[in-house]
């Protein structure tokens, strides 16, 4: 993309009709997100809504409601009546927190509850998941249900992709992060010693059920971590969403929660539809990495587990805003707005304790996406619009990192 030349007085402000999502731009010479903005209407407890992810023969619906237990139970019954076996993979935290929901959805179907956390997204966890499918004799007509956060979705999805060279799977996300991000788009996989998410497959789910009522038992820190991804969507493609979060921070009890989750899924679906396998030269799925190159480096340098993924991404969003300022795209006031929204959602804007630049730099150059494309970042052209940019000066990355607390 071309360098930003920030006009005196600033670019369009968040909420500016010139920049709202849904605006179809004609100057598409640069990699940027163009959305056709499906209506982001609220839904109430009794009503389910559908958003279709259009990927040809791999298309699927995302269903939204506060409670989808009965609908999932009906799907399980339909599969049973057709002689198709199902297997459910969840984790022990969700199984303990919501046993009634699990029973209502899946009755007496076989359930594997893995240990919570990244440790289960491993070769050993993958082996256990495959053994479970084997024990329950899933044949080619079998269906795997992933019921959990991103860990369960990635693990169960990869097991479904590998089992008998690919069986169907359906996603029931139970964390905010999984609802707005990991359950949609078909990336599945596990971690190995060489790095996170290095082994996996593109395997689209057959359906995604986003039942926001399941968030009722999610710990507050995990909800906040998911908010980092919500803020990311506002920053990269929806100035109105960002402005709404700025006016009133979103909580699990917010009336706007359902519509916001749906809007994030619509943004992700639009990006995935345009670049399913992340092969676009510029922009495309890579835009979803806004804040993530910084964030992955923080997670890696701090040691996994110190920061939740979303917390590292939150700091990464602040660092990306600072980098965008150095490139002449954002003003000081924009950076301050990003930090205020991040902080208002109980997320860190700076490292809790300094991490050395050499370690962060090292981690960045080992990041698989950086390795593949050189020092390439997602930068903000303004609040609500992002683009990929190569040829970034390392000194500006270092300076941005130092401004969020690197030593
Ligand atoms: N596939 C993708 O496109 C994609 C995108 C983003 C992230 N990810 C992956 O997602 C993972 C992170 O996902 P996450 O943030 O959902 O973490 P997670 O799956 O570890 O869940 C977070 C915690 O919440 C608990 N939990 C989940 N639902 C609950 C509920 N309703 N009530 C109570 N506790 C509940 C879990 O047991 C866990 O302790 C990472 O492995 C990341 O790599 C994948």
Image (tube, grey):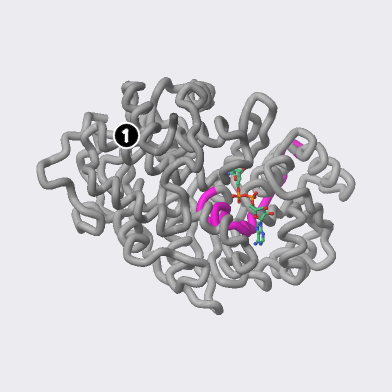
On the picture, is 4 further left or further right than 115?
left
On the picture, is 337 further left or further right than 277?
left
Residue drawn 80% across the image and 68% down it: 107
Choose between 116 and 258: the one closer to the eye.
116
Choose between 291 and 71: the one closer to the eye.
291
Can residue 40 be seen? yes
Vertical position of residue 295 compared to residue 367: above or below? below
- Quadrant, the C terminus: top left
Can residue 288 be seen? no
On the picture, is 73 further left or further right than 242?
right
> Is residue 175 part of the magenta span, yes or no?
yes
Q: Neighbour class for label 1 at 10 Å: few (<14), some, many (≥20)?
A: many
Q: Residue furthest left?
A: 8
- Determine whether the residue tagged by mark 1 lies in a helix, strand or loop: helix
Choose between 168 and 405: the one closer to the eye.
405
Counting the numbered discs, the total is: 1
- Quadrant, the N terminus: top left
Vertical position of residue 43 compared to residue 76: above or below? below
Q: Which residue lies furthest to the bottom in this view?
A: 46
| Image: magenta residue range | 163-181
**Which residue corresponds to mark 1?**
323
Q: Position of residue 364 (x, y in %)?
A: 48, 26
Q: Where is residue 326 in the image (x, y as percent from the top left)?
A: 26, 32
Residue drawn 76% across the image and 65% down it: 106
On the picture, is 360 further left or further right than 83?
left
Vertical position of residue 1 compared to residue 58: above or below? above
Residue drawn 45% across the image and 73% down it: 255
- Picture quadrant where residue 63 is located: bottom right
Residue drawn 47% across the image and 52% down it: 347
């Amino acid at each position: 993309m071309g360098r930003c030349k920030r006009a005196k007085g600033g670019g369009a402000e968040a909420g500016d009709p010139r920049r709202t999502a849904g605006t179809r731009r004609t100057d598409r010479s640069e990699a940027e997100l163009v959305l056709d903005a499906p209506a982001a209407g609220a839904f109430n407890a009794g009503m389910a809504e559908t958003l279709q992810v259009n990927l040809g023969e791999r298309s699927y619906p995302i269903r939204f409601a506060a409670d989808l237990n009965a609908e999932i139970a009906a799907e399980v019954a339909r599969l049973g009546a057709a002689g198709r076996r199902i297997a459910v993979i969840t984790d022990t935290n969700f199984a303990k927190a919501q046993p009634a929901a699990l029973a209502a959805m899946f009755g007496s179907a076989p359930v594997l509850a893995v240990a919570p956390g990244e440790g289960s997204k491993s070769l050993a966890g993958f082996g256990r998941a495959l053994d479970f499918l084997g024990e329950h004799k899933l044949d080619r007509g079998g269906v795997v249900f992933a019921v959990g956060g991103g860990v369960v979705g990635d693990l169960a999805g990869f097991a479904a992709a590998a089992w008998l060279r690919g069986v169907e799977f359906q996603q029931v996300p139970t964390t905010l992060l999984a609802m707005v991000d990991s359950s949609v788009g078909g990336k599945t996989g596990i971690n190995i010693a060489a790095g996170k998410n290095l082994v996996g497959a593109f395997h689209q789910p057959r359906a995604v059920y986003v039942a926001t009522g399941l968030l009722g038992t999610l710990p507050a820190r995990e909800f906040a971590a998911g908010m980092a991804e919500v803020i990311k969507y506002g920053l990269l493609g929806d100035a109105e969403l960002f402005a709404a979060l700025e006016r009133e921070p979103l909580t699990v009890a917010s009336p706007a929660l359902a519509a916001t989750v749906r809007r994030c899924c619509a943004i992700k679906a639009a990006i995935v539809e345009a670049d399913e396998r992340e092969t676009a030269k510029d922009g495309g799925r890579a835009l979803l990495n806004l804040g993530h190159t910084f964030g992955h480096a923080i997670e890696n340098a701090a040691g996994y587990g110190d920061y939740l993924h979303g917390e590292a991404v939150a700091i990464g969003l602040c660092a990306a805003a600072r980098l965008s300022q150095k490139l002449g795209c954002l003003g000081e006031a924009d950076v301050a707005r990003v930090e205020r929204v991040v902080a208002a959602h109980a997320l860190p804007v700076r490292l809790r304790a300094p991490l050395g630049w050499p370690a962060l730099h090292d981690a960045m150059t080992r990041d698989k996406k950086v390795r593949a494309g050189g020092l390439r970042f997602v930068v903000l052209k303004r609040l609500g619009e992002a683009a990929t940019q190569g040829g970034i000066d390392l000194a500006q990355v270092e300076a941005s990192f130092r401004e969020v607390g690197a030593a």
